[in-house]
Amino acid sequence: MLDIKYIRENAEGIKEAIKNKNIDLDLDNLLEVDEKRVKALKEIEELKAEKNKLNEHMKSVRDDAERKELITQGTKVKEKLAAAEPAYEEIKKEYDGLMVSVPVIPSDDTPVGKDDSENVEVYKRGEIRKFDFTPKTHIELAENLDIIDFEKGSKVSGYRGYYLKNEGTLLVMAMMMYAINKMVEKGYTPIIPPTLIKGFALFGSGYFKGTDYDSATDNIYQIATRDKEMDGAESKEKKFLVGTAEPSLLAYFSDEVLDEAKLPIKVCGFSPCYRSEIGDYGKDNKGLYRVHEFMKVEQVVVSEASIEASTALQEEMIGISEEMHQELGLPYRKLQICTGDMPAGKYRAFDLEAWMPGLNRWGETGSASNFLDWQARRLNVKYKTADGEKKFAYLLNNTALPTVRPLIAILENYQQADGSVVIPEVLRKWMPGGMDKIAKRN
């Protein structure tokens, strides 16, 4: 969310961002609604001031006629307030609904494009393997090696369900241990955050399209079960499952005033991730590419309010993910996300995509985003400078390593002619007995 003063001062740039990000918002209408909001609020404040003045005057009145007149005036003020306050709330509700759609003006180097087809390839790294046999898909490999069971997963979990088993389980856990240790080596504090969270964390991080959860548009699972507060009373709070550790990690700093000297703060979170995939029904129906649940190690950084500093941190964050792709031996490419594929809150964004030979295409394995202070304003994350000034922090996030898509890439890139799969060397220390290959059982 942006500051309304900033919006007024940068209206033309924001209008351009609205157009380029394909956002349905009339900025002039928002500014008109804001004028009504300010006017309505001023009226309420004046009426409250008048009410207080009358109450103070009443304390010193001794004449009955004058007291009666003051009571009449007070009644009129109360009646006006009773009408003005609901009217203001309606205007405020409309204002808030419009404000959540106001986009961050993207960075100067962000390509302008209509959708994800116009994302720009920055570069490729790694050699795409030339097979002397027809490569299998990860689905074929997994079923032949008995490391994933899609049929039982669908039976028990439903559409997009799966069971990891045998060496599939071990390989995925090795990936997560490798990623966590890599992040710690790079100076990130490891955290296992809650995955059942309140709505404010999802709104604050931008995972609600509007001001509240909408099951028709938000790629989030809401928990229907009733909950209890500490005193035993029924909770009024809605609870949700996270799609990534990002909202939980960001909310850890909500309503905080941090010390500038301690910035940047770097944390990484391991968590299960749950996604309804409502906008992608019918896509990638088979296999692991698009599933409802998986695991991931996520990076989050709290930065000072500096374009230069936050840009350097974003490059560092995605650089760590690139290093892991290189150490895993996965050919990959880096894409810069264009405006039409960029949500409202993002200032600058990149994706990494690994080559998946069985699928014969690139597949997204991570995303790095700089939101500037858009999330910090929603979550009220501030820091105090050396001279005592309070500023909203800049917040960044990046996928360190998820489970399923890199697993696809490992299975498909490391497959052998006999149907076995070589385990990347960097993961073998996390495998029982230093296991170096997954082979079919007799």
Image (cartoon, helix red, strand yellow):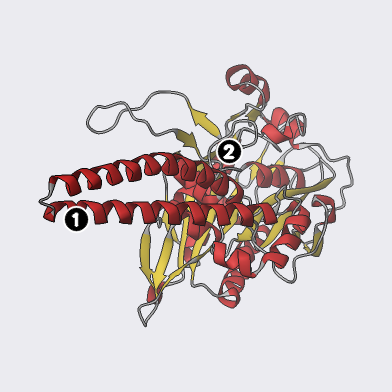
Decide: is 18 above or below 94. below
Give the residue displayed 60% in from the left and 31% down from the top: 215
SS for tag 2?
strand
Q: Nearer the viewer, residue 64 or 6?
A: 64
Give the residue displayed 82% in from the left and 57% down from the top: 113
The answer to whether residue 330 is seen in the rendering is no
Counting from the top left corner in percent of width and height, residue 396 is at: 55, 61
Q: CA distance from mark 2 to mark 1?
A: 63 Å
Name the image quarter holding the N terminus.
bottom right
Q: Nearer the viewer, residue 221 or 273?
A: 221
Q: Nearer the viewer, residue 191 or 14?
A: 14
Mark found first going from the N terminus, 2 or 1: 1
Q: Nearer the viewer, residue 44 or 327?
A: 44
Counting from the top left corner in percent of width and height, residue 182 is at: 52, 61
Left or right relative to 38: residue 7: right
Mark 1: which amino acid? Answer: Glu
Pair 2/1: label in front: 1
Give the residue displayed 81% in from the left and 51% down from the top: 115
Residue 56 is labelled as: 1
Mark 2: which amino acid? Answer: Phe
Which residue is under mark 2? 294
Counting from the top left corner in percent of width and height, residue 123 is at: 80, 66
SS for tag 1?
helix
Q: Residue 314's image quarter?
A: bottom right
Decide: is 410 above or below 380. above
Left or right relative to 285: residue 277: left
Give the residue displayed 58% in from the left and 67% down from the top: 6
